[in-house]
Image: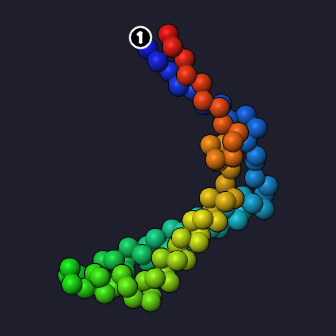
Amino acid sequence: MARAVSGLTNNVRTLTQIEQDKVKSLEEDRVALMESYQTMLAKAETEEERPLMLESEEFKALRNKLSAVTMEIQFLKPNPISSGDFIWLFRRH
C-alpha cells in the first residue's frame, strides 16, 4: 500500500522587490557572520580554551548578531507552515 503526503501552499504571501533585496542582503550578512563564527570556534585549539572563548564578550556579540540576522530573515521570508496557509493532505491508496 503506497502512501503519499502532499502540501499545498497556495495563498502564501510573495515578497516585494524591496523585501527580496533585504533578504538577499541579510543572507549575505549571515554567510559572513557564519564564517567569522567558524573562525572563532577554530581558534579555540584545546578543550580548556573553548569554554573561555564561548564566554568571551566578542563571541557573545557575534552570536547575538548572527541570531538577530537569522530571525530577521525568518520574519521576512514567507513560511506557509507557520503562517497557517499550509494544508497537509494525506492520501491512502
- Residue in the picture at 50% in, 10% down: 93
Helix, strand or loop at mark 1: loop
Q: Where is mark 1, residue-wise? A: 1
Residue 36 vs 6, above or below: the answer is: below
Q: Quarter of the image holding residue 7?
A: top right
Q: Looking at the image, which residue sits at the far bottom?
A: 57
Residue 33 vs 90, above or below: the answer is: below
Task: Report whether residue 28 is seen.
Answer: no
Residue 41, given in percent of the width and then of the height, sits at: 33, 77
Task: Report whether residue 12 is seen.
Answer: yes
- Residue in the picture at 75% in, 52% down: 15
Residue 84 vs 6, above or below: the answer is: below
- Which of 9/24 is in front? 9
Horizontal arrangement in the rendering, residue 4 relative to residue 71 (left or right): left
Residue 89, given in percent of the width and then of the height, sits at: 60, 24
- Residue in the picture at 66% in, 37% down: 86
Q: Quarter of the image holding residue 67?
A: bottom right
Placement of the N terminus among the 4 image quadrants = top left
Residue 18, given in percent of the width and then of the height, sits at: 78, 62
Horizontal arrangement in the rendering, residue 85 relative to residue 30 (left or right): right
Name the amino acid type tagged 1: Met
Residue 9, given in percent of the width and then of the height, sits at: 68, 35
Horizontal arrangement in the rendering, residue 35 relative to residue 22 (left or right): left
- Residue in the picture at 30% in, 77% down: 42
